[in-house]
Amino acid sequence: MTDYIDSDLTSAYAHFQSASAGDHVLLTNGTYNNPTRKSLTKTTGSTVTFAAQNTGGVTITGQPIDIPDDNTIFQGFDLQYYITTADGTYVTIDGAGCTYTRNKIHFGNIVSPGAQKWIRIKGNNCTFDHNEVYGKTTIEDMVLASETGGGPTGCKVLYNYFHDFIQNPGDTKSEIIRFGNSDLAYSDFNGEIAYNRIENIDADTEVISIKCTNVNIHHNTIKDTLGSLVLRQAYNCTVTANVLINTGLRVYGSGHTITRNQIIDDSVGGVSRPMFIGSADVEDLPVATLNANYARFKNNVVSNNIWANGNASSSTIFMLGDDGSKSFQPTGNTITNNIIQASTGTLTTAVGGTHPADWTANTVSNNILYPTGTAVVGDMPTSGYKQQNPLLKRLADGSYRCAYYVDVPEVGPFSP
């Protein structure tokens, strides 16, 4: 293994091109302009690293650097690319097994209504981790994992900080993270979105949008957004242990497990929040899925979640079905052992209308509903819940735990 330490991009690109397995090409601290779009290619198929010698010490301006080859590690840069092409993509990761890590990503924004994807992952088994992505104003996604025909599979978006994505007027398609596309709803991504922090977002109604099968979304914190975490055209996903503060959760499809999440303090309200179990226009998505299609929410598990201090701006904290004009309402789901607590609004509502949702079409049991102030329980059947104080205790990080026991100081074994 060899470390090449370069002070200009031309030399660094040449060293990367000819590198051997395990080599590192390192740029010394400074600002570098990349004058034309670059595909970072190499002759070996083995792992080679292209990195800042000191993380955060190297700024790259100018045109984007794409990652077309397998097993490339791209690490540690302050990336300030700028392109003027509307409907373009800043960075495409086509290679399999690539890692895009510890970068600061703040690309230039063209004038509205330009649409630009910032990072598009097409290669299998890629990892996008420990990056800071911020300051987007143009339409389209911050990070998109999608490839024509299916996949990519095995991709992970982990430990990133996404913040300050402010909507252009009329913007309706700007997710922070999107896996898949309407025509990939049945494509098995085997993906993971975990340990990310997302905050201060005013873009799309879908902050995380899943349009594929088999994505594990866990231990993310999403705070102060006008959108929600959405299983939009998705099957067999897991949503576990996420903390959603002043945001929401909206779900469609089947085979999902939604458990141990906390949805807290929705003071904004609006579409798809705090909890919308959606109504559908089809039983299951057609193979040639349209973006307008919604699959029935069926045969899913919603358990051990907490909705705390939901606000009446959404009228309802937990909504079963959101549109009584649609024929396919939620059915066959297990809704159990959840806590719903609020001081205003209605805790639970099954949507009415021509095709009303029905709690009894689902298995509803052992939930705790606790209205205080002006809040009311709503229409969940009494067989599905107990009305009692869950004794939630708020922790320093803003999340909750149940405090059914008395907190006492820890004492040592020899204390009196």
Image (cartoon, grey):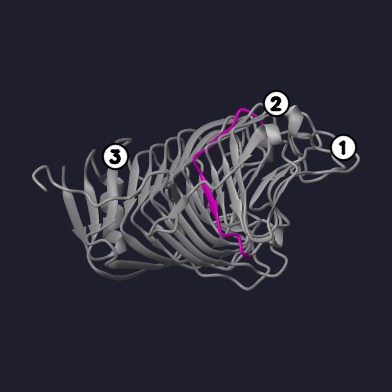
Q: Helix, strand, or loop for circle 3? A: loop
Q: Earlier in the sequence, mark 1 or mark 3?
A: 3
Image coords of residue 75 (percent x, y): 31, 54
324 lies left or right of 342: right
Image coords of residue 52 (percent x, y): 27, 59
Dividing the picture into quadrants, the one containing residue 311 is: bottom right
Location of mark 3 (residue): 47
Q: Quadrant of the N terminus?
A: top left
Q: Amino acid type of disc 2?
A: Gly
Q: CA distance from mark 1 to mark 3?
A: 56 Å
Q: Residue at x 72, y 39 (%)?
A: 380
Image coords of residue 66 (percent x, y): 44, 52
328 lies left or right of 42: right
**Foreground tag (1 vs 3):** 1
Image coords of residue 325 (percent x, y): 87, 42
Residue 290 in view:
yes
Dividing the picture into quadrants, the one containing residue 147 is: top right
Q: Amino acid type of disc 3?
A: Thr
Location of mark 2 (residue): 332
Residue 341, label in figure: none
Location of mark 1 (residue): 355
> Is residue 257 shown in magenta?
yes
Q: Is residue 287 above or below residue 13?
A: above
Q: Amino acid type of disc 1?
A: His
Dividing the picture into quadrants, the one containing residue 247 is: bottom right
Observer-nearest residue: 302 or 338? 338
Query: Quick check: marks 3 and 2 in contact, CB under 8 Å?
Result: no
Observer-nearest residue: 96 or 250? 250
